[in-house]
Amino acid sequence: MTVDDLDPSHHFKVGAISFTGNHIFADSDLQSVMRTKPRPFYTPWKARPDFEPDTFTNDLNRLRIFYEAHGYYHLRLTYNLTTAVKRKDEVVTLEVRVAEGQPVHIADVDISIDGYHPPPNIAPVTKLPIHRGDIFNQQAYAGGQEILRLFFVNGGYARTTARRRAQVDIVRETARISYTVHVSSKAYFGKTRLRGNQKVRAKIITRELAYKEGEEYSNQKIDDSRTHLLNLHLFSAATFTSDLESSAAEIPIDLNVREKPQHDISLGGGYSTQDDFGGQALWNDYNWFGGGRQMSVLLRYASINSRASVSLRQPYFLDQRDLEGGITATLQQEDEQTFTLHSESLAPQLTYHITKQLTGTVGYRLMYAQLNSVSSTVVDALGGLRKKGIVSGPIASLVWNNTDDQYYPTRGAIVTLLGEQGGIIWGGDYKYYRATIEDRNYTTIAKNTVLATRLKFGAADSLGPKRDYPLFLRFFPGGEGSVRGYGRWRLGPLSVSNDPLGGLSLFEGSVELRHPIYQKLGGAAFVDFGQTSLRPYTFPSPLRFGYGPAVMYQTPIGPLRLDLGIPSKAPRGDAWWQVYFSIGNFF
């Protein structure tokens, strides 16, 4: 049955849509092109969408255009419609048959830069996303023109222009591509004329500019400046306009900003398997007493971890662009199976952005801690512990991050080194050291499939009697953010009373495959492993494993995740499975 066979007097609904014969693109890729869409399987309570014959006919054209844009000009599409009555609705089920045919390959890529034809192994040729022998892709072809232009624009040749041309021979299944680039004379940044700021001082804005007057012109520096300004949370928009019509060597820049409220309050609540039900209120001032410094007050209640904190962040500390100061005061109560911790702490820190990827932080922790509800079996197993006292000492970290996305990384790595020491020359009651190193890697191994891996090592020990090491700073693996399949802190040595003892040596790791399922819905399969040891510098054994599936839904603040973890060996008295709900990938 075709569209023409449908009775125009009847009102039809969209049922299932299936594809056959497609090998290059997944069903979800083809469905995303179409305007005719079925009801999502996870919303069975919603009404089915109306079936519009004209829209479906246009969808077939959209599919042809989609395939041609990816180099497949010999596409043949047929389809079949079937109708049935489901719960009083006349439902149309669609089967689209795809014959993809052979693709068009690129036979030649010619680049002319003001008459000069550069060899294929030098920049900017190597930056092109399209090469001889590739399948012709219209997006990559168009992108090559902009890449060539920006290569020279970002080198100071602001008025450079580029043109492109493609000759596609469908019979021979080849395409010949040519780019012509006209390089302008050298240009430099002129004066920046600022408009739109009313409450924010001009100095706060101009210090975020990634360029200076007289420097070589670069579009990349303008893009970086826009990012810096929006990251202040003081502006809803920052528009840069370059006067390229003038032939002058110095190009003036018009910067127009649109301010937004400098304060905000956010309220949140929810449920996680780690903290059960909880809620929080967060107040932010993004320009506290001017200077672009940021003040925040957090009130958080949860079954396990509740806190009240005040934080102050000072960018451009000592007028240094890459230096940031901060201080946080915190009152906290942590109710764990092994102990209840009441603490008050003050933590100043300095952060230095060494490069775009590398960040170093040094800080100090001054904390009064009091432990309650500690079982005598825990005390005996650890050879004694200090139940209250002052923690005093430095903390330092070094983070390398070259991932491509904050929430959904598909390539790159994050390497984190963290170390701290307390007591001895720093005073306080606890005398110890603690260090961890963690490596997270992300690789796209197939179309839209990401392999994420993680390895973490930790070592810690007392610098005196065993009781001088803080119980609350021991390594407690297990649960969300650690080895899934186990309850919170339930992986590792347990006391006679079945309480986690934590350890002084840690080894953890994860392997996870992530792949989209449908639109914003994705899935994952993971294997975690880890263990901790009561002794320092001892490889923890035996390793325990946790494995299972996960589903994710993309949101602007990270994925909503639901993980099902199954342990290789559940601790005594624990369930043989664990469910974790969280916002964001934990690695």
Image (spheres, helix red, strand yellow):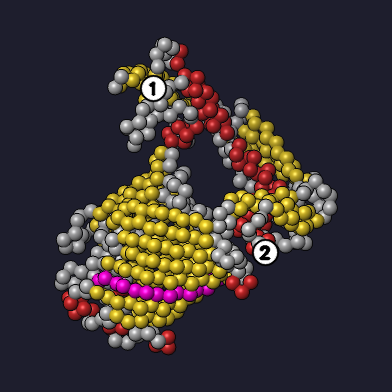
Q: Is residue 68 left or right of residue 206?
A: left
Q: Position of residue 120 (x, y in %)?
A: 68, 49
What residue would you read off at disc 1?
Answer: 13
Q: Position of residue 75 (x, y in %)?
A: 52, 26
- Closer to us: 528 or 193: 193
Q: Distance between the residues labelled 2 and 1?
A: 59 Å
Sort mark 1 into few (<14), some (14-19) or many (20+) by Cα contacts within 10 Å: many
Quadrant position of the C terminus in the picture = bottom left
Pointer 2 or 1: first along the chain? 1
- On residue 480, the disc is none
Secondary structure state at the residue bearing disc 2: helix
Secondary structure state at the residue bearing disc 1: strand
Q: What's the magenta bit mostly, secondary-structure-wise? A: strand
Task: Find the magenta span and give its range.
Answer: 339-355
Asked if residue 347 is among those painted magenta in the image, a careful observer would answer: yes
- Closer to us: 504 or 258: 258
Q: Where is residue 578 in the image (x, y as percent from the top left)?
A: 25, 54
- Specify the amino acid type for callout 2: Lys
* Image quarter of residue 187: bottom right
Asked if residue 567 is among those painted magenta in the image, a careful observer would answer: no
- On residue 203, the disc is 2
Q: Is residue 9 left or right of residue 119?
A: left
Q: Position of residue 168 (x, y in %)?
A: 65, 31
Is residue 487 among what the camera can see? yes
- Closer to us: 117 or 307: 307
